[in-house]
Image (spheres, rainbow, N blue to C red):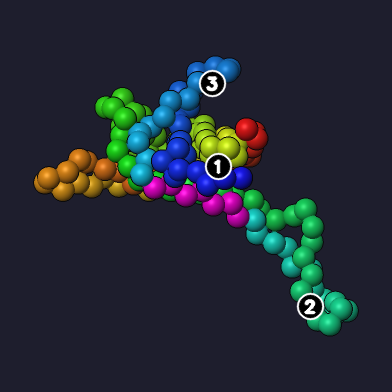
Amino acid sequence: MAAQKGKDVLLKLGNGDGPPETFATVGGLRTTALNFNSQSVDVTDVESAGQWRELLAGTGVKSASISGSGVFKDGASDASVRQAFFDQTHDNWQIVIPDFGTVEGAFQIRELQYAGSHDGEATFTLSLESAGALSFTAL
C-alpha cells in the first residue's frame, strides 16, 4: 500500500434516517486517529508452560476510539455534532480510510472542544468511543 494523505481520512456522521442511512462529512479534519483495542482474558495457571502467560482466544471486550481536529464544514454539521454531545446519543459514524476501507458503527462523543485565535479560524477537537458492534468494509 502506498503512502496516503492524512487529509483524505474522513469522519462522517449519520443522519438517523434510513435504512439505508446517509452520512455527511462533519468538517475538514487536519488530524485524525483511529484506535482499536481488545482486552485479553488471562487463563494462566500453575501448569502453564514455563509460567508464560496464556490468553483465552476469541474472548475479551473490543472497543474503538476516534479522535480528530479540524474546522467544521458548516453551521449544520457543527449543530449536529454539538447536539449529539449534549444528548449523549449513540449515533452511527463512518471513518473512511483511503485505500483501506470504512469502519462504521455506533459511537458516543466523549469530548468536544472548540478553540481559535484572534487571527485564525475556529477549530474543534472531537473524541468518540464505540458504543456497539462495528463493521469494516474493505475498499
* Sequence order check, earlier mark of 1 and 3: 3
Write down the quadrant of residue 77 in the picture.
top left
- The answer to whether residue 43 is above or below residue 137 is below
Label 3: which residue? 21
Magenta stretch: includes residue 18: no
* Sequence order check, earlier mark of 3 and 2: 3
Left or right: 36, with 48 as reference point: left
Residue at the spot x=61%, y=45% of the render? 1
Left or right: 113, with 3 as reference point: left
Residue at the spot x=64%, y=51% of the render? 62
Write down the quadrant of residue 102 in the picture.
top right
Residue 90 appears in the picture as rendered? no
Q: Which SS class for mark 2?
A: loop
Label 2: which residue? 52
Label 1: which residue? 131
Mark 2 crowdedness (10 Å alpha carbons): few <14, some 14-19, many ≥20: few
Closer to the camera: disc 1 or disc 3? 3
Q: What residue type is disc 1 on?
A: Ala
- Please give the range of residues in magenta: 31-37
Mark 1 crowdedness (10 Å alpha carbons): few <14, some 14-19, many ≥20: some
Residue 60 tag number: none
- The answer to whether residue 115 is above or below residue 11 is below
Q: Nearer the viewer, residue 99 or 24?
A: 99
Residue at the spot x=37%, y=40% of the render? 29
Q: Whole-Å distance between the Cαs marked 1 and 3?
A: 18 Å
Q: Whole-Å distance between the Cαs marked 3 and 2?
A: 47 Å
Q: Residue furthest front?
A: 2
Q: Magenta segment, principal secondary structure?
A: strand
Q: Position of residue 112 (x, y in %)?
A: 34, 45
Q: What residue type is disc 2 on?
A: Trp
Q: What residue type is disc 3 on?
A: Glu
Left or right: 110, with 122 as reference point: right
